[in-house]
């Protein structure tokens, strides 16, 4: 009987003892969140809101969060960098300890995170929301030096400004090349929204110019809506070369300013390369990433299936039907926060409800969207219902959806860092 | 005895595991679902300009709007796609949740 009691006790008590070293000692539970974007900000904010007694630390390398959403509008010239640049003062006022440093190591057995600056943080639960890293050299000829000549602008900041400046400096009649990546990657509609936004600028300022999109894929997010918008707004300006037409780029040359595709070699005046990606470095270091570089998770709690006590949210995780978007990260983080708080209290994590909405704006007053609701199933995160905006919708709908995009931006910024 | 004990433990654990997954898929609470809504609809502090606020939204009107969007009787840019995810019961629960915010 003793054996059985001990065994049962050990099984049932696992959460209460191993998972809660700080609670067991009578201290506040400690939650460390790595990465201060949409996923990390939301996770930190909601854990603190749902469990004020918890000590929540947000580790973020940069002093400011420059959002990828809306960065295409800076490139197109309808927004300024200031619009997409945010501080961490508001979330700090809500009781989240913000540490500007870089997480460089995770010891999941000791439940410790090591920072570049030397500090070591204890945790009961760790959230990793590191976003993406580029696989430098994953596309021949494209490394960090080449990115200074052929910007990716796929992490917003100086790269966004660089691409905008190159467009401003380009001659009328020039060729802009966008190299789109294979799936999976951050922001599936992003390259095509960007083409629209660049066309918006060129149509006004350099109308003889053209845009080529080289793409290894045969289909992409909101494809019919993008094609319809290019036709309506920028006839003849944007050409998409998909997988079937030999659009897969095999090499770029930043000295010659060329891209080599299966279709042939093309010279560009401005070349924007969206490189191959994987989960941010700390995910690889912590051992939560798989052989392809992305992080498998429990669809109900977002806890890593590889390392207990570590939750992975946002672009870095493998979230089934959910795209790698800011809204997905925000929704995953909110549900992960609820699961974490329940686990810290020794309760069953609540059933999650996931959502995504991605607006694309391709001209001032011309927007459309993809949206869906999702649920956790034993096979992963599945879509319940959703879809894209109607084709041939009246201009007032496109205008409304562009306005809604701005409201979405206000809302998600408030939910994540406000 | 030893074997029996192991079997007993095994049964208890298996029952516990089944108990989590077996009955009709667990449903998220209205509050869990509603936290998705506020990303676009916002609390007042977020400063939305065009999208209707949901705090204190009249319950009867929300049920009418959501079922109308879902069943194709009301035109929408985006809510027609989202509303299809919800049952009558979930819509009623969401309406009750927002009516008292």
Image (cartoon, helix red, strand yellow):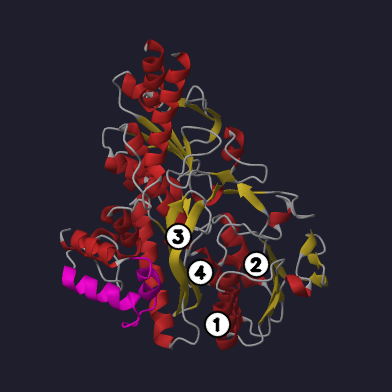
Queried whether the magenta region covers residue B73, the answer comes back as yes
Question: Residue at coordinates 82% horizontally, 72% vertically from top-left?
Answer: A263
Q: Answer whether labels 1 and 4 touch (C-beta < 8 Å).
A: no
Residue marked by disc 2: A166
Mark 1, secondary structure of its residue = helix
Query: How far across and how far down the image is residue A141, in percent?
Result: 79, 55
Q: Is residue A377 above or below residue A368?
A: above
Query: How far across and how far down the image is residue A183, in percent?
Result: 64, 59
* Residues marked 1 and 4, same chain: yes
Q: Is residue A302 left or right of residue B24?
A: right
Mark 4, secondary structure of its residue = helix
Question: Residue at coordinates 67% horizontally, 46% vertically from top-left?
Answer: A292
Q: Which residues are magenta?
A: B58-86
* Residues marked 1 and 3, same chain: yes
Circle 1 or circle 2, nearest the eye:
1
User: Where does the N terminus of chain A fall, quadrant-wise?
Assistant: top left
Work out how far the residue at label 1 is from the one at label 3, CA to CA, in angstroms: 25 Å
Circle 4 or circle 2, nearest the eye:
4
What mark, if any, has residue A84 been given in the picture? Answer: 3
């Amino acid at each position: 009987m003793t054996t059985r009691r001990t065994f049962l006790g050990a099984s049932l008590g696992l959460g209460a003892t191993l998972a809660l070293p700080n609670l067991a000692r009578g201290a506040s539970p400690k939650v460390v969140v790595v990465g201060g974007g949409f996923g990390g900000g939301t996770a930190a904010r909601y854990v603190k809101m749902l469990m004020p007694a918890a000590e929540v630390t947000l580790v973020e390398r940069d002093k400011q969060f420059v959002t990828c959403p809306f960065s295409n509008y800076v490139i197109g010239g309808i927004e300024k960098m200031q619009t997409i640049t945010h501080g961490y003062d508001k979330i700090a006022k809500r009781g989240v300890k913000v540490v500007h440093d870089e997480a460089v190591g995770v010891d999941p057995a000791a439940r410790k995170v090591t920072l570049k600056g030397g500090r070591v943080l204890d945790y009961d639960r760790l959230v990793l929301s590191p976003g993406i890293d580029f696989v430098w050299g994953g596309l021949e000829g494209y490394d960090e030096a080449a990115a200074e000549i052929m910007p990716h602008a796929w992490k917003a900041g100086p790269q966004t400004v660089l691409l905008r400046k190159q467009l401003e400096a380009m001659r009328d009649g020039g060729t802009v090349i966008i190299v789109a990546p294979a799936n999976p990657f951050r922001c599936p509609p992003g390259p095509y929204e960007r083409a629209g936004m660049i066309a918006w600028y060129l149509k006004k300022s350099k109308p003889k110019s053209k845009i080529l999109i080289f793409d290894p894929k045969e289909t992409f997010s909101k494809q019919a809506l993008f094609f319809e918008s290019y036709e309506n707004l920028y006839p003849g300006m944007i050409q998409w070369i998909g997988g079937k037409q030999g659009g897969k780029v095999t090499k770029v040359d930043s000295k010659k300013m060329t891209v080599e595709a299966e279709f042939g070699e093309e010279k560009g005046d401005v070349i924007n390369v969206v490189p191959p990606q994987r989960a941010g470095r700390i995910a690889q270091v912590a051992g939560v990433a798989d052989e392809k570089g992305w992080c498998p998770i429990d669809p109900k709690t977002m806890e890593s299936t590889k390392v207990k006590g570590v939750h992975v949210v946002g672009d870095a995780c493998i979230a089934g039907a959910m795209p790698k978007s800011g809204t997905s990260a925000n929704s995953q983080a909110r549900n992960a926060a609820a699961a974490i708080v329940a686990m810290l209290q020794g309760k069953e994590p609540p059933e999650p409800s996931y959502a995504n909405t991605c607006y694309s704006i391709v001209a001032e007053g011309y927007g459309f969207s993809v949206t869906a609701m999702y649920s956790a199933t034993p096979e992963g995160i599945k879509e319940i219902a959703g879809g894209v905006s109607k084709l041939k919708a009246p201009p007032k709908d496109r205008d409304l959806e562009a306005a809604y995009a701005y409201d979405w931006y206000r809302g998600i910024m408030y939910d994540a860092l406000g | 005895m030893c074997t029996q004990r192991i079997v007993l433990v095994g049964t208890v654990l298996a029952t516990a595991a089944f108990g989590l997954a077996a009955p009709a898929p667990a449903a998220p609470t209205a509050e869990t679902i509603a936290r998705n809504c506020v990303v676009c609809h916002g609390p007042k502090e977020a400063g939305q300009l065009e999208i209707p606020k949901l705090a204190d939204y009249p319950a009867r009107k929300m049920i009418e709007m959501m079922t109308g969007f879902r069943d194709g009787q009301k035109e929408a840019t985006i809510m027609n796609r989202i509303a299809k995810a919800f049952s009558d019961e979930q819509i009623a629960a969401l309406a009750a949740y927002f009516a008292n915010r």
